[in-house]
Amino acid sequence: MILLHLYLDKLKGKKGILDFNLYIKQLNDKTKDLKIFHEDSKKELCINLADLFAWGIFRKYEKNDLEWYKVFKNKIKVEKILE
């Protein structure tokens, strides 16, 4: 049995959270082993770090600013633009 914990920034209200969780669980019947946590990113370090990583990618492609991207670019194994 594989147990997966998914942590998300708590951006939505109660109904939005319930709708999101239901949608994800409907994607695959194996999601019974999935636990979804909606947490405040200011209190959850891993979400905060993911936000920083995403911000670096955003800055690269939307603003042509590579300053933050250069900090972690050597850790990226595959980078592919989907259109």
Image (tube, rainbow, N blue to C red):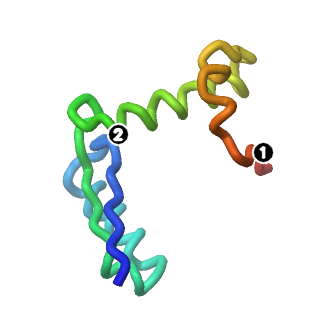
Q: Quadrant of residue 71?
A: top right
The label shown at residue 46 is: 2
Q: Position of residue 59 (x, y in %)?
A: 64, 21
Question: Observer-nearest residue: 14 or 45?
Answer: 45
**How many C-alpha atoms fall within 10 Å of the one at disc 1: few (<14), some, or many (≥20)?**
few
Q: Quadrant of residue 22?
A: bottom left
**Alpha-carbon span between mark 1 and mark 2:** 24 Å
Q: Position of residue 50 (x, y in %)?
A: 45, 37
Give amino acid for label 2.
Cys
Rendered position, 61 above or below 33: above
Give amino acid for label 1.
Ile
Under circle 2, the secondary element is helix
The label shown at residue 22 is: none
Is residue 58 left or right of 55 when viewed as pictured? right
Q: Position of residue 5 (x, y in %)?
A: 32, 62
Question: Observer-nearest residue: 45 or 37?
Answer: 45
- Which image quarter holds the N terminus? bottom left
Is residue 50 left or right of 35 when viewed as pictured? right
Rendered position, 78 above or below 15: above
Residue at left 32%, top 73%?
A: 3
Rendered position, 34 above or below 59: below
Residue occupied by mark 1: 81
Residue at left 67%, top 40%?
A: 76
For marks 1 and 2 on the same chain, the one whose residue lies earlier in the sequence: 2
